[in-house]
Image: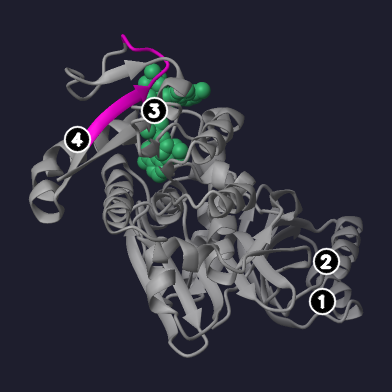
Amino acid sequence: VKTIRVGFLGLGVVGAELVNIIRANRERILSKYDIDIELGKIFVRDPDKKRSIDTEGLQLTTSAHDVIDDRDTDIICECVGGAGTEGTREYIIRAIKNGKSVVLSSKKVLALHGMEILELARSYDATVKFDATVGGGIPVAKIIKECFKGEEIKKVVGILNATSNFIYSKMEKEGLSFEAALKNAQELGYAENDPTEDIEGFDALYKAIILVMFSMKKWVDIKKVKMTPFSKISVRDMKYANELGYQIKPLVIAENKEKLVYRIGPCLIKDSHIAANTFNNYNMIVFEGSNSGILGFYGQGAGSKPTASAMFDDLVGMLIQQQEGGPDPVSSELYNGIHAVDELQEYENNLYWRISVENKIGKFAAIASILANNAVNMEKIIQKDEVEDRMGIVLLTSSVDPETMSRITGQFQDSGVKIHIVMPFLGE
Ligand SMILES: NC(=O)c1ccc[n+]([C@@H]2O[C@H](COP(=O)([O-])OP(=O)(O)OC[C@H]3O[C@@H](n4cnc5c(N)ncnc54)[C@H](OP(=O)(O)O)[C@@H]3O)[C@@H](O)[C@H]2O)c1
């Protein structure tokens, strides 16, 4: 029997659940693999804090270095997160340099410092696993490694932020406003008190960077990516999209072209699309392989149990690898060939516009002529509800490049046309 000591950074929502799972599975792992998982030191901020689990016998410490520098600890489970991103990065780097393997939970740290962490892991022959960082309970790294051996992943479409998807589902199904749906999500524990990271798209951005890194081997500098906040959506748009046979979803799109094409923001997708039926706090990741075509993976994207469960799978993978010796095949397959890319291009496709104009004769003609003068094809113009003396209008147009868009925006403004939202359709 080999004893492997596991240290913890953080014992919050996820860390405590991971300790629970380790305790519940210790005997099973022992009898199946002849490995005894020993709980090592655990770094917390406040050792006297009341916790959701029994802390009897746990070695809590307020020094992260007690955990990372402990010679007898083999594996570190990082459950601290991005709250102290710089601190977390330093802990991970020091742990790798100390020869430890690390199971990561923090998408923010991986999205900001992924290249550095993986290069260091490679040079120190350390294993870093991170399956909980993108899709919560969806084992995305294992899927990428196992399912696309002989082909290129051409496109990824994901609903990666469970909070926003929950809010959108409530808006669509129950007609709640964004604010009311957010409040509901907070009451049910699906949204934080400060929901900025989720509803403004940062959480999806971190996950998108990690997903692109491992599925397309491209490392993108986070500062170069623009997002459209998920919060910029109204129940009116949901209703109009439904009338057209579409739904609005908080999407991440990445296309593996010469320039990396991407979008992080709300998008219209056809009712029949596999991601259109992903509701509430569920996530969906759809890969398009050059041979396999479309493969969709559905699961709970957040929550302590699915996240801790994904981390436990990573941990067991590491235990077995340490037992058998040699490099970890999943990680080495994933790390190799990742390179930084500078050339990014925002996703372009046909557009949905919701605009409003003063209710006066000739306004439709003015809109049509501005679009025509800018060589934009108007496929539909639909008159909608009047709000505060302004006529609501939905336009469906061909795609518009950023330069033309800024010209049209100016010309609309001069003609008294207010743009409320512009969103692309997701192509087939
Ligand atoms: N919760 C989820 O559903 C979920 C899903 C996917 C991924 N994750 C990731 O899992 C990680 C942990 O999330 P969590 O929800 O478990 O967080 P949490 O409940 O806030 O726990 C954080 C833990 O880290 C400790 N800590 C030490 N230094 C800290 C600092 N500077 N700032 C904040 N905490 C510090 C805290 O100590 P004290 O206990 O003494 O305060 C606590 O034990 C994050 O990376 C998160 O992104 C979470």
Write down which quadrant ligand 1 falls in: top left
- Which one is closest to the eye, mark 4 or mark 2? 4
233 in relation to 278, above or below: above
Tell me: 213 left or right of 42.
right
Q: What residue type is labelled 1?
A: Ala
CA separation in Å, label 3 and label 1: 58 Å
Q: What stretch is highlighted in magenta?
A: 38-48
Mark 2 and mark 3 in contact (Cβ < 8 Å)? no
Ligand 1 within 8 Å, label 1 CB: no
Does any portion of residue 199 appear in the rendered image?
no
Q: Mark 3 points at which residue?
A: 10
Q: Name the residue under label 2.
A: 402
Sequence-wise, the earlier of marks 3 and 2 is 3
Rendered residue at 43%/87% (across/down): 292
Q: What element carries label 4?
A: helix
Q: For residue 233: magenta?
A: no
Q: For residue 41: magenta?
A: yes
